[in-house]
Image (cartoon, rainbow, N blue to C red):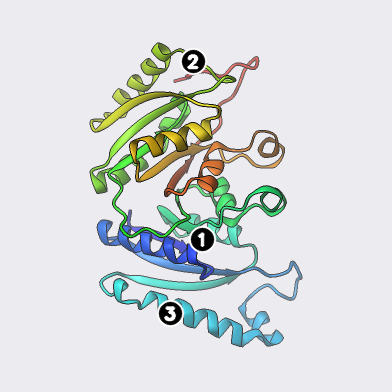
Amino acid sequence: MKKILVPTDFSRQSESALDVAISIARKSGAELHLFHVIETPEYPEITDIMAYQSLGNANILDSIEEKLKTQSECPTCSDLQVSYSVDFSSPYEKIVRKAENDGYELIVIGSHGKKGVDRFLVGSTAEKVIQHASCLVLTIKEPLSYFAPSDIVFGSNFYGEIARGFKALQDFAALYDSTIHLLKVNTRNHFETTRYSRQLIETFAAEQELNNYTVTIYNDDSEEEGIRHFAEDVGADMICVPTHGKTGISHLVSGSIAENVSGQAFRPVLTYRIQPVRISYGVIGPFR
């Protein structure tokens, strides 16, 4: 990782995300960019900084830039390359676009973990970034005294489509010499035999040339609960879940395991996008 994007709204969660991003940057030698997006109404006259200033809000903009400047010059950042910028419009759209256009390999973002009606109506910026970002997204909910993930839980079905993007997790784990715990969660609705699941996982591990890993088949009421419960059982420092980035009707119907885990787990959650497989005759399997 050479470039890390850190969206901030100056909340406690954003400060926690910045602390983690600083730790990763120091470990990897990456540069940091702090990014604040002012959410504006969808009116044609409020489209850029000059228009915003002309409407008498220059003091707000100055205040935001001063906060970003203070964060970028904090004592823990003194040995790092840190920059910052401000933009306008929809936060998640600007974050995703900036990450893609400017070649960021990792987004570290704080999550408020909206639940219930609030989540259904407006979701959260972190959740939408997970849905749409093409790079790794690390979600932080709670302050961490020290970020050095020695144990990472990777929850998946281990079908063929998850291989693309897994190398990014391997590179991340290599930074910290982490053990990757390969986890398949069996549920009542999605059941596979232990023998079959273990063969899938071992084949995947061999294809990815993994060395420092474990294999577990875990039974629980849902994939999300199984991933969180297993992470608690082994004292994992971080969870990684690939996501298809579902949106629209498919997201309302079935949701996303990655987004649900990131919203519910108190541990840092790393996600990466994968392409959904084409399903013929209602059957999905380990296509390779």
Q: Residue at x 32, y 70 (%)?
A: 81
Q: Residue at x 51, y 34 (%)?
A: 225
- Looking at the rendered structure, the kind of residue marked 3 is Lys
Rendered location of residue 287, percent (x, y): 48, 19
Mark 1, residue position: 98
Tell me which corner region of the image, top left, top right, bottom left or bottom right, holds residue 39. bottom right
The disc placed on residue 69 is 3
Horizontal side of 172 relative to 106 (left or right) equals left
Horizontal side of 254 relative to 1 (left or right) equals right
Q: Residue at x 41, y 75 (%)?
A: 71
Question: Measured along the vertical axis of the image, is residue 74 above or below residue 182?
Answer: below
Crowd class of label 3 (few under 14; some 14 to 19; many from 20; radius 10 Å): some
Tell me which corner region of the image, top left, top right, bottom left or bottom right, holds residue 29. bottom left
Tell me which label, 3 or 2, sits earlier in the chain: 3
Q: Residue at x 44, y 46 (%)?
A: 269
In the image shown, does 57 or 262 lie closer to the viewer?
262
Front position among marks 2 and 1: 2
- Looking at the rendered structure, the kind of residue marked 2 is Glu
In the image shown, does 167 or 128 lie closer to the viewer?
128
In the image shown, does 220 or 89 lie closer to the viewer?
220
Quadrant containing the C terminus is top left
The disc placed on residue 192 is 2
Horizontal side of 157 relative to 21 (left or right) equals right
Front position among marks 1 and 3: 3
The reply to whether residue 7 is visible in this rendering is no
Distance in Å between CA atoms under marks 1 and 3: 19 Å
